[in-house]
């Protein structure tokens, strides 16, 4: 099975990104599928980017992906702009994309609403995403739940091309994770960069504790003697991602029966989160000291990706009458 996914280079991913998407990237890689994973810098510039920061963000994202376990021996990891066929196919698909359908794209509508300087790239973003996927004829696309509509458009464009020209493309399936949403430390529905309610994958212990110690819990628990309800507590929902059954039972009993305080509960969570994140951060710190190794992994990835992508592009050119 062939897999494609992309991630924007807009800062280090956080726990929400890990459980919402990256965990599936790793699973598919480790099951032995043929995975193409791309750092989608061309999508990133649909909103303004500071050039120096963007180039740093690309290397940092690559180092983070390698640190969490994306293995360039198994997966093809590359930067989108190093494989020109994505954009070349995007133009052709954009000539098949119905305006009405494009105007209904939720992510565009939301971004455009909050920023009245929206540009044409932001509008056509989903077509480039479709091209990313179709250029590899991917079967499966592991993404966050917010990307479902873009995947639907991808299938529509594949069908349109196939009907109009030649059966070239597969209709890719979307793969979501079990945990579609990780709650924010402030207790709001979703961990997100813009709300600063997250723990990043390379956060150091001090920062993690600083964030956890003030994180929201069940508001009914003011004193240790106040019983609480773990089901509505975001600290408990994080425990469910990081803690074993014994710890979970201890939290539930301690919270409901007011045997432990929220700080005790957070201390155990801190230990379990840092057991998981410390090795990732250590690998990241080693990699970021050797950016040339990261660059060379990306270069190799681009070579492999270009081979597949340029073959598809030639088939597309042939099918639509560009070969004369
Ligand atoms: N739009 C995706 C996101 O913001 C990133 C992305 C770009 C992508 N191209 C893709 C994801 C292709 C999957 C497949 O998360």
Image (tube, helix red, strand yellow):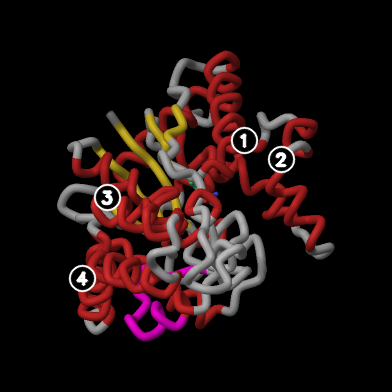
Secondary structure under badge 3? strand
Q: Is residue 276 above or below residue 24?
A: below
Instruction: State the separation of the CA atoms marked 3 and 4.
Output: 23 Å
Proximity of marks 1 and 2: CB atoms separated by less than 8 Å: yes
Magenta residues?
198-210
Q: Nearer the viewer's eye, disc 4 or disc 2?
A: 4
Camera-side residue: 165 or 74?
74
Of mark 3 and mark 4, the one earlier in the sequence is 3
What whole-number distance in Å separates the C-alpha atoms at marks 2 and 3?
A: 29 Å
Which is more toward the observer, 94 or 272? 272
Q: Which residue is mark 4?
A: 279
On whether ligand 1 comes within 8 Å of the CB at mark 3, the answer is: no
Quadrant of the rendered structure where residue 34 is?
top left
Q: Is residue 203 left or right of residue 95?
A: left
Q: Which residue is mark 1?
A: 149
Label 2–label 3 contact, CB within 8 A: no
Residue 94 left/right relative to 316: right
Q: Earlier in the sequence, mark 1 or mark 4?
A: 1
What residue does disc 3 label?
76
> Residue, x 55% and y 52% (percent of image)?
232
Q: Which mark is residue 14?
A: none
Secondary structure of the residue carrying tag 1 is helix
Q: Is residue 194 above or below residue 84?
A: below
Query: Is disc 3 surrounded by few (<14), some (14 to 19) or many (20+) residues within 10 Å?
Result: many
Image quarter hosting the N terminus: top left
Residue at image point 57% right, 36% down: 148
Q: Percent from the top left, x then y, of residue 96? A: 66, 29
Counting residues from the start of the chain, the first of labels 2 and 3 encountered is 3
Q: Residue 112, how many percent across, how many down?
A: 78, 56
**Pointer 2: what residue?**
105
Residue 265 seen from this side: yes
**Disc nearer the start of the sequence (1/2):** 2
């Amino acid at each position: 099975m062939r897999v494609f996914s992309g991630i924007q280079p807009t800062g280090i991913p956080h726990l929400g990104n890990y459980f919402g998407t990256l965990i599936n990237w790793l699973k598919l890689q480790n099951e032995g599928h043929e995975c193409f994973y791309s750092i989608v810098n061309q999508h990133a510039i649909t909103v303004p980017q500071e050039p120096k920061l963007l180039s740093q963000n690309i290397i940092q994202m690559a180092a983070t992906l390698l640190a969490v376990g994306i293995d360039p021996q198994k997966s093809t990891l590359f930067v989108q702009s190093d494989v020109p066929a994505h954009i070349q196919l995007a133009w052709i698909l954009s000539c098949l994309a119905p305006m009405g359908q494009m105007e209904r794209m939720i992510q565009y509508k939301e971004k455009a609403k909050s920023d009245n300087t929206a540009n044409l790239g932001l509008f056509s973003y989903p077509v480039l995403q479709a091209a990313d996927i179709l250029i590899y004829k991917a079967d499966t696309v592991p993404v966050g739940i917010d990307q479902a509509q873009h995947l639907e458009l991808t299938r529509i464009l594949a069908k349109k091309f196939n009907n109009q020209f030649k059966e070239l493309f597969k209709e890719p399936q979307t793969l979501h994770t079990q945990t579609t949403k990780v709650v924010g430390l402030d207790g709001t529905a979703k961990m997100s960069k813009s709300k600063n309610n997250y723990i990043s994958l390379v956060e150091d212990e001090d920062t993690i504790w600083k964030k956890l110690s003030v994180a929201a819990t069940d508001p009914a628990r003011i004193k240790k003697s106040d019983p609480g309800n773990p089901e509505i507590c975001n600290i408990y929902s994080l425990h469910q991602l990081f803690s074993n059954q014994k710890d979970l039972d201890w939290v539930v009993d301690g919270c409901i029966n007011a045997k432990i305080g929220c700080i005790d509960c957070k201390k155990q969570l801190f230990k379990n989160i840092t057991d998981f994140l410390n090795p990732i951060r250590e690998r990241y710190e080693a990699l970021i000291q050797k950016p040339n190794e990261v660059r060379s992994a990306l270069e190799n990835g681009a070579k492999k990706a270009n081979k597949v992508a340029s073959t598809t592009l030639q088939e597309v050119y042939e099918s639509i009458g560009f070969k004369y």
